[in-house]
Image: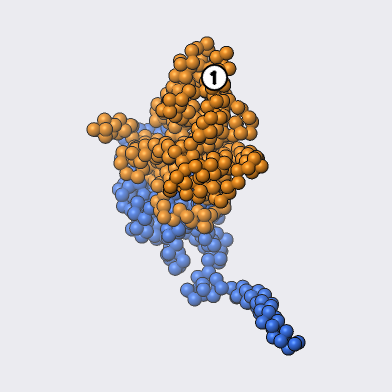
Amino acid sequence: MFYSIISPLLNSMPGLSGYVFPNEYELHWSILIVIYPYLTGLVAGAFILASLERVFKVSALKPIYRLSLLTALAFMIIAPLPLLAHLGHPERSFEMFLTPHTASAMAMFGFVYAWYLMVVLLLEIWFDYRKDIVIWSNEKKGVVKYFYKLLTLGATDISDKAVAFDHKIGRVITIIGIPSAFLLHGYVGFIFGSIKANPWWSSVLIPIVFLFSAIVSGIALMLIVYMITSMVRWTKMSMKCLNKLAEFLLYAMLIDFSLETLDFIHRLYESEESISILSEMISSRLFISLIITQIIIGSLIPMLGLVFGRFGKLPDELRRMIYFISAILVQVGIFSTRWNVVIGGQLFSKSLRGLTTYKLDIFGIEGLFVAIALLVAPIGILWVLTKILPPWNEMGAVQKDIEKMSSSESA
Amino acid sequence: MKKTNTKLIRPEIERRAFLKNCSKTFPSLLFLVASFDVQNILANENGSYDPTQHNYAMGVNIKKCIGCARCADACKSENKVPREPHFFRTWIERYVIPEDGEPIVDSPNGGIDGFPEISEKLHIERTFFVPKLCNHCVNAPCVQVCPVGATFATKDGVVLVDPKWCVGCRYCIQACPYGARYLHPETEVADKCTFCYHRITDGKLPACVEVCPTQTRIFGERGKKSSPLRRFFKFNEIHTLKPGLNTKPKVYYAGLDGEVI
């Protein structure tokens, strides 16, 4: 049923036009490679948001600090899967660690990923939760008790001195973590930006645009996650936190949109040999996903919404609704951005004389269902993580903070 | 009393002496092994071919190409390239440049089944065929980007893919400015022209060069007086594809038109 509805849409795309090199008829990087930068962007964005609270002491963001870390971890666990699934020989993927070709931008992926996961995310989460883990390992019963005992890694000292040390280390890791998060997603951008054969990708701005779009997507994601988790748990949301998130989201979007516009104008003004085929591509193949979805629906409308929602005189209910819708639209926009970079970069031939087309499979490893599964999986992992390490478990402290904040707001 | 003491100490001395000897022996053994050129011994066992003595390249004289695409056909047979369209190690492009308007370029099935007739109504200024293949670049972007080093440049100047090492990530396909690579549908690894490496190291010509009826393709070696490429370079104006990308191709074109990308 679903297939019969969607297949005419997918097949109605125009076919080849102009001259395309024979080996370029089929796209080599599919939907899975669209998902990969999308997921790593969310990881980097969520982490950078968490670090705002930790390093820059933005206290309004306290309610979502731990939630952001867990969200980053949940998405990080899934992030390499689309890459792995896409490989012709996934069983050989470990060769990237064993015999990395140091000149290759891609060879460093494993190391950047391992660094970020092991050194930054896991360590920071562990230090942040250590005191709670020790408490849980004493309070809980049965197997759960031993599970938490295992998680303590034998460090059961929760004296004030030890906890103060945890905080200190946590801060240091966050400070290391910020450039690492920049590295993680800037690096993903570099994988594309360094391909001189492809004029759509080859731009020094790509890693920077990737980075800012990552921050945008991460903040928007945390807005959504925070609102949904609060609604599900029937707890009061901190309006101060939401307002702060909306502000940061708006600022990040302004920078991101300016950079992308700069890139666009720069290309138009320089008007290199590829300009005519790229213009043709934008006005035909990418019109919907670039002009409509990315720019209008995914950037301009949510930016207007955020300005209106944040700075207009509105009741909190309406404000929350505007934030939520804007954040959802931002996700649509950022996904389109990834799509336009990855798929767009392969829709025109390197002969610069023709355009090809991409048909999304429905079934199969590079199909729509696998893509949806990969996008939904992190949410499932996040749910499990919040069960193991409840981010709202310092309930007393955080909830009190929130109440204090909301009471001071209403006053 | 003294005697028992030495007995007690004796095993320690032996251990120490043993370690001392080891520290002397291992480096000397390493030195001994390193002083033999192991690679050369192995190579000589396999035959007399010495890759360091060669630097292969190809010349393509566009003025001579008649677009028969026997080269593309022979390549598919020789190298077991899938017969379906869209998998080519080499192909022929036809350029039709009208008196006014944009050039029309095509390469249906790589030219193997011939080219469709051009409408008589079209006023043609000039037309020509261009054989394309991997350029075996000196600064090959595909070699640079391969994350596991499965794509590599040989000492005799050929860019090859190790099908047993390639992970199939397709980064090389994206990085090639010439569209010369494809993912082999059966082996799921990157594939491309090898200059028929199995033939040239055996003293034969690549299949495409062997079958070309007009000697459009000249195979040889750079810097060798006896190479047919020497004459090709001497009597032609030589161009390479996309020179602005600094890939330094080793497929050289004579009579290359500015419209060819």
Vertical position of residue A337 compared to residue B79: above or below: above
Viewer-closest of B134 and B46: B46
Q: Residue at left 53%, top 66%?
A: B51
Q: How is the image coloured?
A: by chain
Q: Position of residue A401 (x, y in %)?
A: 56, 25
Residue A35 shows up from this direction = no
Residue A315 shows up from this direction = yes
Viewer-closest of A60 and B145: A60
Q: Residue at left 43%, top 47%?
A: A142
* Residue underneath mark 1: A406
Quadrant for the N terminus of chain B in the image:
bottom right
| Figure chain in orange | A
- Identity of the amino acid at label 1? Ser
Q: Position of residue A50 (x, y in %)?
A: 56, 33
Viewer-closest of A64 and A88: A64
User: Tag 1, which chain?
Assistant: A
Chain B's colour is: blue
Q: Position of residue A21 (x, y in %)?
A: 40, 43
Q: Position of residue A383 (x, y in %)?
A: 42, 37
Indicate the secondary structure of the residue bearing disc 1. Answer: helix
Spot the residue most to the right. Answer: B2
